[in-house]
Image (cartoon, helix red, strand yellow):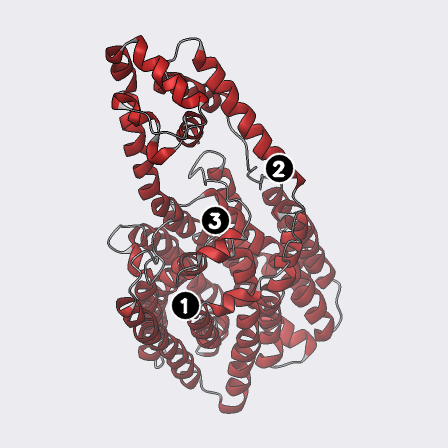
Amino acid sequence: MGRGDAEEAHLPERVKPPDGGWGWVVLLGCFIITGFSYAFPKAVSIYFKELMHDFHVGYSDTAWISSIMLAMLYGTGPVSSIMVNQFGCRPVMLVGGILASSGMILASFTTNIIELYLTAGVLTGLGMALNFQPSLIMLGSYFDKRRPLANGLAAAGSPVFLSALSPLGQVLLQKFGWRGGFLIMGGLLLNCCTCGAVMRPLEAGMKTKTEKVQDKYETKEMLPLGGRAGEVISTTDSTKKSKKAKKKKKPKKGKKLLDFSIFKNRGFVIYAIAKFIMVLGLFVPTILLVNYAKDIGVPDTEAAFLLSIIGFIDIFARPSCGMLAGLKWVRPHVTYLFSFAMLFNGLTDIFSAKSNTYTALVIFCIFFGISYGMVGALQFEVLMAIIGSQKFSSAIGLVLLIEAFAVLLGPPSAGRLVDALKRYDVIFYLAGSEVLLSALFLAIASYCCLSRGKKKASQPENPPVCGGGSETEEAESDAQEAEDNSSDHHHLPHRVNIAGGDAVNHMAENRNAGGVGQPEGENAALALGGCNVEEAVERDSF
């Protein structure tokens, strides 16, 4: 699943993720955005019974509200990618927060189901999409080594908000009706604008004053040439400035708004197909669960509490799974852990298809919360590992577009089957089978098409099959080589002092001669591979 050096050469310079600092504030914003994006379409199902009564529609008609909302969240992924690449994450998120809030506020004044589709479905879904995707991009830019944990903590926003929004929606429904509930929910969505405001972009090419002073200090330590050390440092600085000026003069290539070259990556293609199959059945149980519980005689409050149980279990499952995925012996195989999570979720749906008591539904919610939390914590971590952070904005946009078609097919089809068959067990069997199939496809295809091909390849420098290693870890080997080379130079002051003034003069003569000849004796450490002094200083300081 590696990226070629030729492709990386055309990518923009990547800023080293701080793995902390302001990144924790970004993580909090991503936590809130993820909570609204995933929990809101499920929490809206609390109002479905009232909507069916007021608008005289069926299960499938009301299920379209959540489906359209999720379809917009996924289907507008490429639009969000283009806007992020063009304007940046922060402006896009601010606009998205306003759209999401406006959609729910306008939905409170609707008079038919079609208007609900356009307001609560299309407008709110679009606003959530413009918040959700940029928040994940910012999270990936701020975290690298701690990225699995960060993804797990951010994904925990979904269950936290689901466990809070479900009972809140029931209270609002009882006190203010569905119209008042939609109006208040629209006000809550304005918090997305606050989250967008904290998404401060990382700036490339910036060095702190401490780093600059440290560079000059290390140069003086490596070259104790007395009065000539200042010349060497000034020469190095002027060389760097001239190189920067040349870079500025080079014409900038047009930035790709959407990078379709990721489809050349077999790992990405396998992942996209597996996600499409999974999404067909992943959201169906949670969308129909409340109505199913009400139909078998469970009181409304207790039926709404089932979603809170899923959310409560999910709260602990996602960070735990994120920490598990971050372990050194697990991270290279995170794709297979993701396959296991989907397998667990699919089997939970199948074995719980005959649940017809409140106790059985509670047990189903516990196991579903664990498996659903594992899937939620790993899905974007696997994509980041396959593609990398530099192409992630395009990758997630295209993946979400592919998933949008599955979202539009899954829940509405399940609702239509409920209207036709009046049986929920068939829906659970079907949804579980789809998730189970996606798990088997991802595991088998990753092993057959990627792992075996990796073993046959003769180039050891390719990254791991599952792309589990962090990009910082990939660069550590090069940094270690640089440290080994520089360790020879740290002994240089002692060598020069021992050699005496003649050795220094001899080195200066070689430098003035253009570095054509090789330095002799102890001074050979200053000219690695025939390089002159200026080149050695520039490489070491870099």
Q: Residue at x 48, y 77 (%)?
A: 280
- Residue designated by label 2: 246
Of tags 2 and 3, the one toward the viewer is: 2
Residue 177 seen = no
Q: Earlier in the sequence, mark 2 or mark 3?
A: 3
Q: Which residue is mark 3?
A: 140
Q: Amino acid at mark 2?
A: Lys
Q: Position of residue 399 (x, y in %)?
A: 52, 67
Viewport quadrant of the N terminus? bottom left
Neighbour tally class for label 2: few under 14, some 14-19, many 20 plus, Cα within 10 Å:
few
Q: Where residue 160 sits: x, y (%)?
A: 45, 52
In the displayed structure, 288 sits above or below 31; it is below
Judging from the image, what secondary structure is the residue with disc 1 in? helix
Please give the residue where the numbered disc 1 appears in the rendered image: 267
Q: Is residue 317 above or below residue 405?
A: above
Residue lying furthest bottom: 421
Q: CA distance from mark 2 to mark 3?
A: 31 Å
Closest to the observer: 281 or 53? Answer: 281
300 and 210: which is toward the camera: 210
Given contact means CB atoms under 8 Å apart, are the residues at marks 2 and 3 in contact? no
The quarter of the picture where the C terminus appears is top left
Secondary structure found at label 2: helix
